[in-house]
Image (cartoon, coloured by chain):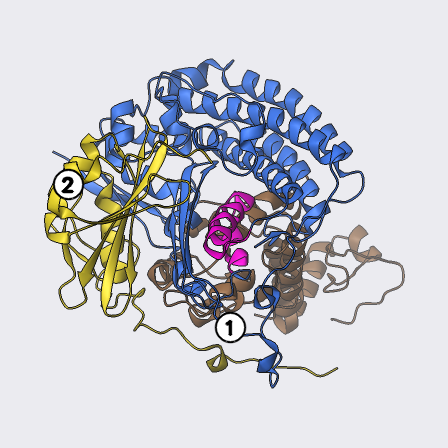
Chain colours: A blue, B brown, C yellow
Amino acid sequence: MSEMWINMGPQHPMTHGLWNLRVRIDGELILDVDPEMGYLHRGIEKISEDRHYNEVVTLMDRTCYVAGMAWEHLYILGAEQALHIRPPERAEYIRTMSEEFQRIASHIMWYAAFVQDLGLMSPFLYGMRDRDLLLDLFQSYTGARMTYEYMRVGGVRNDLPHGFTDRARKVLDWLMERFKEYDQLCMGSDIFRRRCDGLGVLSAQDCIDYGVTGPMLRSAGVARDLRKDRPYSVYGQVDFDVARATTADVTGRYLVRMEEMRQSVRILRQVLDWLDRNPGPVMAENLPRWLGAPYAPIGREGYLLKREYPKGVGFAAIEEPHGEAAVYVVNEGGEHPYRVKFRSPVYVNLSAARKYLVGYHVADIPPIMGSVDVCVGESDR
Amino acid sequence: MSAAPQSRAVRNELPMAGDAAVPFVEIEALRSREFIPAAKEALTSMIAEQGQSKLIRPVFNWAGRNSLFPLHWGLACCAIEFAAAFGARWDAERFGVVPRSSPRQCDLMIVNGTVTWKVAHKLITLYEQMPEPKWVIAMGNCATGGGPFRTAYSVVPGVDKLVPVDVYIAGCPPRPEAMLDGILRLEDLIRLRKE
Amino acid sequence: MTSAPAPSVLWPDLLGDALVALEPMEGTSGRIRFRADAAERVFRAVHDAGFHHLTMVGGIDWVDHREVIYTLWSDERKSYLFLTTELPADHPSIATATKVWPSANWHEREAWEMVDIHFEGHPDLRHLLMPDGYEFHPLLRSFKLHEPEDLEVKVRHV
């Protein structure tokens, strides 16, 4: 009997983030797991209670750093519902475009890290190169590569620059060719197939019981995608399919994410066409004065027009690249939100680790955890 | 430098651009059978006087700054820019920087992200596991001073509260070019090491 | 946003006296306020009504009482439902939902850790996000963060 608990993390090249996977092993066989989180717990929910509604957006980029636009969109949808503000339609299309670009960027980042764990070194470089093209697009209209702070309650900060849609279409055409190359490198590789087929199986019933969502759920055959089931923003007006697989294993999740990237390109083409045809404002009119105001200069606190604003509660749920993310914003009439509660998909997907790790070998942990697509910033918040 | 005439001599400089130079050995001495004792005597006297600072230390500095091995470690958002810097566009490895998974093989720890009190103990353990000489770069606003999360209850306001930091890189996150600039500044610092 | 056919006529029959109030919420199936002591019965009834997916369990500190909010999703109705209850501040305790929805495990651990709500029957109520042995419950309103004035700010005049 050689059972022992070993720590994989918080410093471990496999973990892709700061968390600890404690596994109880007997030789190479995994008997039990206990994920240990909290190494990146930054108290975002508590800090948000001291920030203006628009200032919380800066924290959202850092919450999930590979899917910043998606989390900004999530919070802004919740805050707008709590504050009873509607954005103009062009702003909604720009937000959807940002979220879909971010979905592709997040999945490419996932792909680069996932295949690197399996030993494929070149696709990591290809992935980073292609992701940089998307980050250049983001930089052209938000000014930053990763922490955009772009969306605001009532719209977005600024409109798209001239010629953006043409550049974006070129990038999309380039990416569609690259996805074929990624598939050849992985699905055409015998080593990849033999390592990943049948690994890390989490059945559909287990997924639903344990609250697992996103590509993990869809790889098990359950076609739940919040963009289709409960359309938010402009997803009700674009055509796309929900990516699904039936094998519930690592290969299935890989296939689901690759297909999601292709569907995102399809959505983006429709959204870019709409944006070309419909210029307009990107910020709502008649916003309350304190919403757009930063901290008052010292000595001029009267600058902020403090008054009672109608209370409200906002709930939003999006299909974030990792799964279902939700926010619950409590607005008690002040300038700061009273409580902001987030639901992170990675947090819940990791809680089911016992179900999809026990019974496999230690060498199977990198592909399985890679297929779960861990982003610790949003998990720990 | 020992008194060797500079004319008609073979100049033999190690690639340290003015930091040190091996003393000259006269050409006549090269041709004669006294070359070896002459060279040995010249070198011995030079090393005895200032070899440590003019010969050995610059070589170590040169080797060390051109082969900084950071710990393969990412804490938060800055780690994504750290990873992007190792892509093909901002190839960090051309500076000799190769991430290593084990702290025993590293001499550089780039703290890229928010440091929480929960990870502080592990961070200090990793730092202590690194062999000397070692350096720490605080990358990003969170590692420098807590960043946007400075007021949080679980965040250490800057990693310099835990380990000594050599270079601070500002940014949230700093671009990959900024991170490479920080590494180059560290290389300048290492160039000036005297012991 | 699709709005599911509101099943509000069913809830009083299903929940009986455990139901305190029913409120509509825009874009969802509504918000059910229930009595905390009948929690297990309410969870079982809501689960059997088709809400198999527990999205999140959140705690809110309202100083004189605490609120727990359960968010549920139904694949058949394609809609969210909220269950909320109020717990007294001196004895914030409620039955665990892990017997009905195993995904509540980590949500309840975090709710205990942050807002000091005790879940009876939880298999493993220990710290998740904070280090072991952390005595405070950070998301309570009585737990104050540093004031910005306490932090050093250097202003340079150019």
Q: Which residue is mark 1?
A: A307
Residue B172, relative to residue A239: is it above or below? below
Q: Position of residue A115 (x, y in %)?
A: 49, 29
Residue drawn at x 29%, y 67% is C140
Task: Tell me how far mark 1 sits from mark 2, CA to CA.
Answer: 41 Å
Residue extent of the magenta highlight: A56-85
Visible residue check, residue B112: no
Give whichever of C59, B46 is nearer the camera.
C59
Figure quadrant of residue A69? top right
Callout 1 amino acid = Arg
Query: Which corner quadrant holds the N terminus of chain B?
Result: bottom right
Residue picked out by circle 2: C15
Seen in the image, is A209 located left or right of residue A125?
left
Amino acid found under the numbered disc labelled 2: Leu
Circle 1: element type: loop
The numbered mark at residue A351 is none
Residue A67 in the magenta stretch? The answer is: yes
Name the residue at 63% across, 38% down: A93
Looking at the image, can residue B45 be seen? Answer: yes
* Foreground pick, B21 / A107: A107
Q: Which secondary structure is most common in the magenta stretch? A: helix
Note whether C127 is above or below A363 in the view shown: below
Q: Chain of mark 2?
A: C
- Seen as rendered, the residue at the extreme bottom is A299
Q: From the top left corner, tell me how far across and down residue A186 is, in percent.
A: 51, 19
Q: Position of residue C157 (x, y in %)?
A: 71, 83
